Amino acid sequence: MNADTKTTGLFARFIAPAALGVALATSPVATDAFAQGNAPSSFADLVDQVDDAVVNITTNTTVATGAQGPNSGNPLEDFFEEFRRRQGPDGAPRPEPRSRRGSALGSGFVISEDGFIVTNNHVIENADEILIEFWSGDELPAEVIGTDPNTDIALLKVESDEPLPFVPFGDSDDMRTGDWVMAMGNPLGQGFSVSAGIVSARERELQGAYDDYIQTDAAINRGNSGGPLFNLDGEVIGVNTAILSPNGGSIGIGFAMSSNVVTRVVDQLQEFGETRRGWLGVRIQDVDPELAEALGLEEAAGALITDVPEGPARDAGIEPRDVILSFDGVDIEDTRQLVRTVGNAPVGEAVRVTVFRDGETQTLLVTLGRREDAERTVPASATTEDPAEAEIMGMTVSTLTDELREQLGLEENIEGLVVSDIDPASVAYEKGLRAGDLIEEAGQVRVSSVTQLEERISEAREAGQRSFLLLIRRQGDARFVALPLDEEEAGSE
């Protein structure tokens, strides 16, 4: 795939190399000429404030023959590709070289007078050479200080005899939908270019666990990646990263990684040359209203623990079925918030985690590990049970046999019941259960026979419960599912 047009579905990421710095003080190129929130009659003064700190980035990469080069808006790429394929003088195809050189164009911005530059990771990924071009026309080679593929941010460094003009980061949380913004960069290899628009939306997610994108209608095209998105005070509130497009061109839906995410990454890349995110060591899912009812929670909030492999959480006493309500003083609304909060927490330091367990809350002290060092654990395994089968709540459930264990790839000490068939019209199917799922727990108690499952359901109904909690494991991943016990709700639709 062409390196400057990374695409996932309709999302295209554009190559732009740059480097991240940590200078957050007042910049020599940022003034108060614009008051944030006031509609400007022109962006010319703002451009004059920041243009010296915005850079074009060119990368050179050695790529294997047959692979596409890292072109980022380079109109000569197709010409050279055609030339490479031409026949030799005798009419025979020219022998293909084992490798060839590819180039890419992108954008970035200087964030400190000593030459730190921010861009996207996908712009400079695998590059052999990185060249920075300034607004003045001067060029300097750059080295990579560190990268973070999770947020697609890279930090570069150039050496200059003179202090470089730079731009400061602003607070992306201060931006509101409808605020004016200005994007600068190197679209389609056309050199320094400016586009303007508004903040279309905030807190957008694309694919990553740490995504926090500002959506804008300011034109962003190939080659803009890594360039800055400015507020009207000349502060960088986002790094242009991706667009939503059916054809690879701007249709007014662009995304910039918010500055409050970028600055955390920058600090770590500058200090360590890599990121160091906190790691709790749990598998989690959101709490919906039916799960809240089954667990005894007053409201559907928090992050439900489905599995606790070896790691910091297990060492601290966190258990499956616990619901994390607060982490290090931050109220947790859902799993996304927990992932981001844990990731931003310091590695190796103890934090307080408040969990809901068996109708009560308790606070545990957890010393976080480092996510980048965490190793994935292998799911625990299974036992042999005598064959049995029954129709329950629209599911055909069977005890584990050696044959089923082999079919599902389960280990010898795994216990539970297998969903061998399921009615597509049942509520269980609607809730996401499928044939091949393993039921490990029913009503918060482990089950290994059909009789045990039926008894747990009967006890729940007699106790007046409206929903029933199952712990399901599928291909090693655990998940809680709450099924309604009301006869009409649990029946087929």
Image: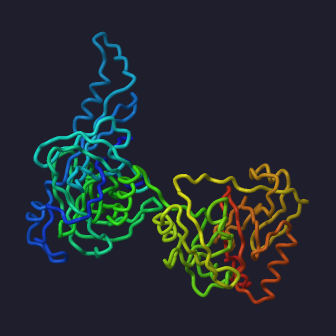
Q: Between residues 147 and 89, which one lies in front from this camera angle?
A: 147
Q: Is residue 11 above or below residue 324?
A: above
Residue 414 against residue 424 in the figure, above or below: above
Image location (x, y in percent) of residue 96: 37, 21
Which of these two is toward me, 268 or 14?
A: 268
Outermost residue, top side: 90
The answer, for residue 12, to whether it is visible in the render is no
Residue nearest the viewer, comparing 114 with 138: 114
Q: Quadrant of the N terminus?
A: top left
**Residue at x 34%, y 55% (from the top left corner):** 246
Quarter placement of the C terminus: bottom right
Q: Is residue 86 above or below residue 231?
A: above
Which residue is pictured at 79% across the width and 58% down the height? 414
Q: How many marks?
A: 0
In the image, is 31 to the left or to the right of 372?
Answer: left
Can residue 392 be seen from the camera position used here?
A: yes
Please state if 446 lies on the left or on the right of 477 as rendered: right
State the image quarter where residue 419 is shown: bottom right
Q: In this view, which residue lies farthest toward the right?
A: 386
Q: Residue at x 29, y 70 (%)?
A: 171
Question: In which quadrant of the rendered view does residue 178 lie?
Answer: bottom left
Residue 314 % position (x, y): 67, 65
Q: Position of residue 56 (x, y in %)?
A: 21, 47
Q: Is residue 19 left or right of residue 8?
A: left
Type of colouring: rainbow
